[in-house]
Amino acid sequence: MTLLSVNLNKIAVLRNSRGGNEPDIARAAATCIEAGCGGITVHPRPDLRHVRPNDVRLLASILRGRVEYNIEGNPFAPPRGEYPGLIALAREVRPTQVTLVPDSDGQITSDHGFELAQDAERLRPVVDQLRQLGCRVSLFVDPGATGFEHAVALGVQRAEIYTGPYAHAFAEGDAKEQLELCVETARRAQQAGLAVNAGHDLSQANLGTLRVAIPGLAEVSIGHALIGEALYEGLANTVRNYLQILR
């Protein structure tokens, strides 16, 4: 079964908007785990707009030995204030997986992936360090990406397909072209020897179609829609609904 990793960034956004500790990100993680999710995802950024380094450390102490821990981020973003850098955080908490994303402060959310042939040499020392820490390494890639042999040569183990365009097309009522692009990208990655993850704007409405279309989909990382739906359905119930779709 495809693993569901719940992204808790939006919990941190709500907390940060008011200050203090509510909603409690640790309690949210525990609720998701008790409901059956297989992983927790966070994406700390240098500007501290949502999940912060201390959240990353706290969650590591809660999750270890229970579910997978996936930390996303830009490995080339330098340390700033409380943010020590992605590699430094990974060295501290030793997550199960680190998903490398080429985002910047100016982006509201991640909206594009790496160019594998172009970025390979720049990524090589990053991947080497993460593998030495015992982390599985995944690269965020666009639908339609090619050059997965470059990722394999670096020691990368997974590719996460950016599903934002698919989700947008689904909402507009015609996802056929974008779905086929995701399927073909997954096929290329798998043929090169990578496992395939998917994430961004996935929801209860569009997840089932994607899951059926991509055999062997290893993991989906879902946050924005899941937390939004949980406002109406409750967090535990929403996680269980996603797990039922993945079954």
Image (cartoon, helix red, strand yellow):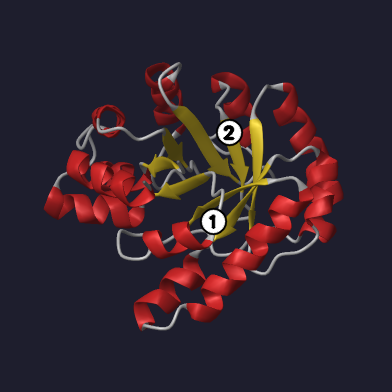
Residue 206 is left or right of residue 234, and the answer is: right
Q: Nearer the viewer, mark 1 or mark 2?
A: 2
Residue placed most toward the observer, 25 or 216: 216
- Label 1 crowd (10 A; few <14 / some 14-19 / many >=20): few
Residue at image position (83%, 60%) is 118
Q: Which residue is mark 1?
A: 105
Badge number at residue 97: 2
Q: Is residue 232 above or below residue 133?
A: below
Percent x, y of residue 191 = 75, 53
Residue placed most toward the observer, 182 or 101: 182
Percent x, y of residue 203 = 34, 59
Q: Secondary structure at mark 1?
A: loop
The three-letter amino acid code for the residue at tag 2 is: Gln
The three-letter amino acid code for the residue at tag 1 is: Asp
Residue at image position (35%, 35%) is 37
Badge number at residue 143: none
Q: Is residue 77 visible?
A: no
